[in-house]
Image (cartoon, rainbow, N blue to C red):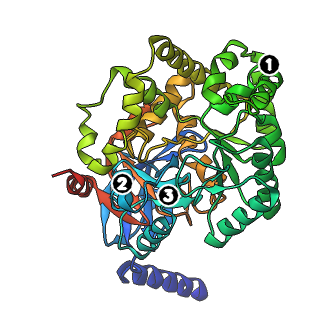
């Protein structure tokens, strides 16, 4: 009995001591977003009333707000708001040579203001500058999205874009890939202005043997099926997928190859009407199955297609975002605008019809298991395709085409991270991942246009609230 009383006394003393002893101090985080709905892009669900803590540029805590204990250098109230991974724009360009380097650099802030925390630069002639911007971003001296880059494009002799690596023979392909490996690029971008089918396929084969990711356009003298079989990782735009949807693809390819020996070789735009007229649902289903089986992704770039198709009727003179585009970049828009205005009515009508057809391919590819990547194709020379806003437009068009908002968001977050091989550290909200986040005032799963309702952007763990973003935007405005 005495021992029992002693035990009770000790227990009571322990409880009393626990009641009076100060609680262990909570860990101090760099940033805490409290009481927020976390958008799970993988499941398409929202986890309500969560607290997300950030330290050292990483997400270190995610959990129910009621269980959270913390101290923070900065706290953002997420009540009524939605937190999702920062957006990825999987097709942009930094280009135009030294005279446009500073103008290109200004676009970095424009991406960030629109919630884009990662971009994939698909070839240009500013590679050294791009790597310098990356170093500055990593050092915290430059605000902008993370950048994956291909460096210079690979094309054939007499390539259209300055700075391209021109190849024709297997040895030239090997030397081009050597140079890209020395640059430590993130992937290989192939362009189709002059490259032969043989050189194009050889680039894929050699790059695959080196463990280098390949993506790009495709000469119409080759077939997408052959490229996929060689190991092509992604096809940019839908012109090349569309050719593979023709029931007469082999015949059309033979016509193109025969024309290369004449004074008037046939290219993509000359062949598109024939491709359109021979479209086959069975052929489309077949190439989509092949792409899915080989994990070849597609980057639809619907928004730039729509913008360019509408150029003859829209000079964009009243676009509010033009005020934030450097005049030197705006000057590069003139070429396509002038060309569009000279188009015959029949050509305009066909372009509109083609873009509508492209929209129908998107849900078919999604249903077949093809990985879709959201990309804008923004950059110098791509008229009125504004950095940042055009990716938001792309998401809206993906949903208009038939994707769910969740599928569209995956195309602009997790799919991009997986494609670039960094899904273990990016593309979703989880402990250990990079703190690249987008805080929205409305649910993007309910309406994809809510990606425009930005309350804050977090890049590398640093929060830019609405007032900060407004100041960044004001600094870009042309005087």
Q: Which residue is found at the position 42% from the left and 76% from the top?
A: 139
Q: Residue furthest left?
A: 479
Could you say where residue 231 lies in the image, as x and y percent from the top left? 80, 48
Residue under circle 2? Answer: 107
Q: Are marks 1 and 2 in contact (CB under 8 Å)?
A: no
Tag of residue 334: none
Is there a contact, CB below 8 Å, between mark 3 and mark 1? Answer: no
For residue 411, which quarter of the picture? top right
* Foreground disc of the pair 3, 1: 1
Mark 1 or 2, closer to the camera: 1
Q: Nearer the viewer, residue 57 or 371?
A: 371
- Can residue 233 be seen by looking at this rendering? yes
Report which residue position mark 1 lands on: 248
Q: Nearer the viewer, mark 3 or mark 2?
A: 2
Q: Residue at x 22, y 55 (%)?
A: 467
Q: Is residue 456 left or right of residue 425?
A: left
Vertical side of 257 occupied by 181: above or below: below
Residue 434 at x, y = what percent? 51, 64
Q: Which residue is mark 3?
A: 63
CA–CA distance in space, label 3 to label 1: 55 Å
- Judged left or right of residue 330, residue 374 is right
| Pointer 3 with pointer 2, Cβ within 8 A | no
């Amino acid at each position: 009995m005495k021992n029992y009383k002693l035990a009770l006394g000790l227990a009571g003393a322990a409880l009393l001591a626990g009641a009076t002893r100060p609680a262990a101090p909570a860990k101090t985080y760099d940033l805490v977003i409290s009481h927020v709905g976390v958008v799970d892009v993988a499941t398409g669900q929202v986890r309500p009333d969560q607290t997300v803590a950030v330290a050292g540029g990483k997400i270190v805590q995610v959990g129910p707000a009621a269980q959270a204990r913390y101290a923070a250098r900065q706290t953002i109230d997420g009540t009524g708001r939605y937190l999702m991974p920062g957006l990825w724009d999987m097709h942009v360009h930094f280009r135009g040579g030294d005279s446009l380097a500073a103008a290109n650099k200004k676009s970095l802030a424009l991406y960030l203001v629109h919630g884009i925390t990662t971009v994939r630069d698909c070839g240009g002639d500013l590679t050294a500058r791009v790597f310098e911007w990356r170093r500055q971003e990593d050092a915290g001296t430059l605000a902008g999205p993370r950048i994956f880059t291909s460096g210079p494009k690979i094309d054939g002799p007499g390539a259209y874009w300055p700075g391209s690596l021109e190849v024709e023979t297997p040895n030239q392909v090997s030397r081009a890939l050597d140079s890209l490996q020395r640059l430590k690029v993130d992937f290989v971008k192939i362009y189709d202005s002059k490259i032969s089918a043989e050189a194009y396929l050889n680039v894929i084969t050699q790059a695959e043997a080196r463990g280098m990711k390949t993506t790009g356009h495709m000469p119409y003298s080759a077939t997408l099926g052959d490229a996929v079989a060689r190991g092509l990782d992604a096809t940019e735009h839908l012109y090349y997928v569309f050719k593979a949807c023709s029931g007469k693809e082999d015949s059309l390819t033979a016509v193109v190859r025969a024309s290369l020996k004449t004074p008037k070789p046939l290219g993509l735009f000359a062949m598109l009407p024939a491709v359109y007229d021979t479209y086959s649902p069975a052929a489309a289903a077949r190439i989509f199955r092949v792409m899915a089986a080989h994990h070849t992704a597609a980057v639809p770039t619907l928004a730039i297609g729509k913008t360019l198709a509408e150029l003859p009727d829209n000079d964009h003179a009243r676009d509010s975002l033009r005020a934030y585009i450097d005049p030197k970049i705006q000057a590069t828009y003139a070429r396509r605008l002038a060309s569009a205005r000279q188009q015959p009515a029949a050509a305009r009508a066909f372009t509109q019809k083609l873009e509508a057809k492209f929209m129908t391919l998107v849900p078919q590819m999604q249903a077949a298991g093809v990985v879709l990547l959201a990309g804008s194709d923004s950059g110098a020379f791509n008229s009125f395709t504004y950095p940042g806003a055009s990716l938001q437009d792309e998401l809206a068009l993906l949903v208009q085409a038939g994707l769910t908002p969740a599928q569209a968001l995956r195309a602009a977050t997790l799919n991009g991270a997986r494609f670039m091989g960094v899904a273990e550290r990016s593309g979703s909200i989880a402990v250990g991942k990079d703190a690249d986040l987008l805080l929205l005032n409305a649910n993007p799963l309910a309406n994809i246009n809510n990606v425009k309702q930005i309350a804050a952007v977090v890049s590398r763990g640093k929060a830019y609230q609405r007032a900060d973003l407004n100041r960044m935007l004001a600094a870009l405005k042309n005087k």
